[in-house]
Amino acid sequence: MTQQDTDEIMARLDYLETAMQLSRQNSGYVRYAELLRKMPDGLPAEVAQLIAAGKNKLAMVQLVRSIKISLPAAQVVMGFFDVREGRE
């Protein structure tokens, strides 16, 4: 996949999320494309280390601090990575 393909997919996601009128102010929602820009290589290393050590709550707090998102958004992000990495 090229950078252009990635950019197109992120633009489509932005469009769909806008069309669905999702509110970021009330829900702590972070657009997927924005999240990818904040974490281009996945979870920050310090967050991944805390997860590996079984310190999920501390990892979530560190994620909030690292990429400046709300706690509800961090919970969603952590859940996404749990599913993606088979840690359900």
Image: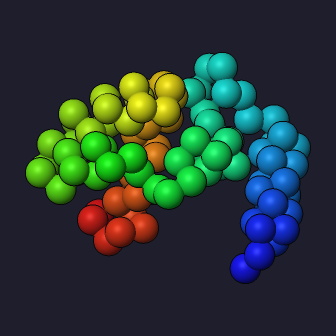
From the viewer's perspective, tell me whether residue 60 is left or right of residue 51: right
Q: Residue at x 74, y 35 (%)?
A: 22
Which residue is at the far bottom? 1
Tell me which corner region of the image, top left, top right, bottom left or bottom right, holds residue 75: top left
Foreground: 51 or 16?
A: 51
Q: Is residue 76 placed above or below 28 in the rendered structure? A: below
Instruction: List x then y, in percent, for residue 35.
Output: 60, 44
Q: Quadrant of residue 71?
A: top left
* Any part of residue 5 in sight: yes
Locate the N terminus and report the quarter of the image it occupies: bottom right
Instruction: Give the number of marks.
Output: 0
Position of 41 compared to 83: left or right? right
Q: Position of residue 87 (x, y in %)?
A: 27, 65
Picture coordinates of residue 55 (x, y %)? 15, 42
Residue 16 in view, yes or no: no
Residue at 84% of width from left, 54% of height from top?
A: 11
The furthest residue to the left: 53
- From this view, report whether residue 6 is shown above or below residue 27: below
Residue positioned 61% across, 50% down in the render: 36
Residue 15 versus residue 9: which sits nearer the camera? 9
